[in-house]
Amino acid sequence: MLIKFKQLDVQPGQRILLKDVSWQQFEDILEELGEKRAARVAYDKGILEIMSPLPEHEINKVFLTNFVEILLEELDIEFLPLGSTTFKNQLMSQGIEPDNCFYIQNEAAIRGKDRLDLTIDPPPDLALEIDITSRTHPNIYEALGVPELWCFEKGKLKINILENGKYIDSSSRIFPNFPLGQLIPEYLQKCKIDGRNKTMKAFRQLVRDYNLT
């Protein structure tokens, strides 16, 4: 491609959509964009999307990540958060950068690895998407075999569970005894009113009171 992607100015909340992008071009674009960037990419069988998130998106992403980490810590479950790592599978011609993702059940399988190859390694057990700008691509996560996808959109949390290669709207298999759909939006809103630290302390105590173990 002739265009220099580092020169593109993608404003927060905007996206660029490119068609007929080959896998090699996708790889070249990823290399040119580099890892230290705000923009996220999604690649689906020749269609490449580059999106720059809004500040609201980033705030919700951080807080939602904090809630997941508290739940895992209180359950004493080992986990590895990999942020917006690029997950891709050339055989499927698909790739995605989640807002955040976690290896939980498969944490031990990828522990210590510097590079992941989804043709060999398992996908993350949980991916998070904050859909402020409508960039979620559940079909890509389905193809990559991500067991659980959480989408936070318009103040609501939707939990997608992979069954027979397709997502269904269901309750979490990772946290089956915790009312995520009710409490996560409630405590996200509390963060904006009471502040981050006060809310996280309250959420941690709530998790302990539920005695999930």
Image (tube, rainbow, N blue to C red):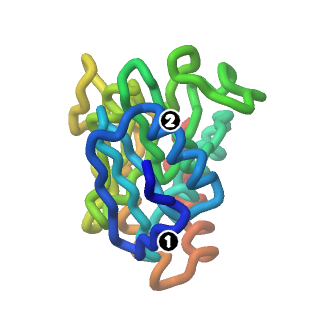
Quadrant where the C terminus sits is: top right
Q: Secondary structure at mark 2?
A: strand
* Residue 205 appears anywhere in the view: no
Residue depicted at x 62% and y 28%: 116
Q: Is residue 99 above or below residue 75?
A: below
The CA span between labels 1 and 2 is 23 Å
> Which residue bears the numbered disc 2?
87
Depicted 7 relative to depicted 150: above or below: below
Residue 78 in the image: x percent, y percent?
68, 34
For mark 2, does the 10 Å Cα neighbourhood hold few (<14), some (14 to 19), or many (20 or more) residues? some
- Badge 1 density bin: few <14, some 14–19, many ≥20, Cα 10 Å: some
Q: Residue at x 52, y 58 (%)?
A: 206
Q: Which is nearer the N-term, disc 1 or disc 2?
A: 1
Counting labels gives 2
Which is nearer the eye, 85 or 69? 85
Question: Which image quadrant is residue 185 in?
Answer: bottom left
Q: Return the x and y of residue 56 as percentages of the image width and height.
A: 42, 75
Residue at the spot of label 1: 59
Q: Nearer the viewer, residue 166 or 195?
A: 166
Residue 157, picture quadrant: bottom left
Q: Residue at x 57, y 25 (%)?
A: 105
**Is residue 69 rendered to the left or right of residue 212?**
right
User: Mark 1–mark 2 contact, CB under 8 Å?
Assistant: no
**54 versus 100 height, above or below:** below
Q: Is 108 or 137 nearer to us in this picture?
A: 137
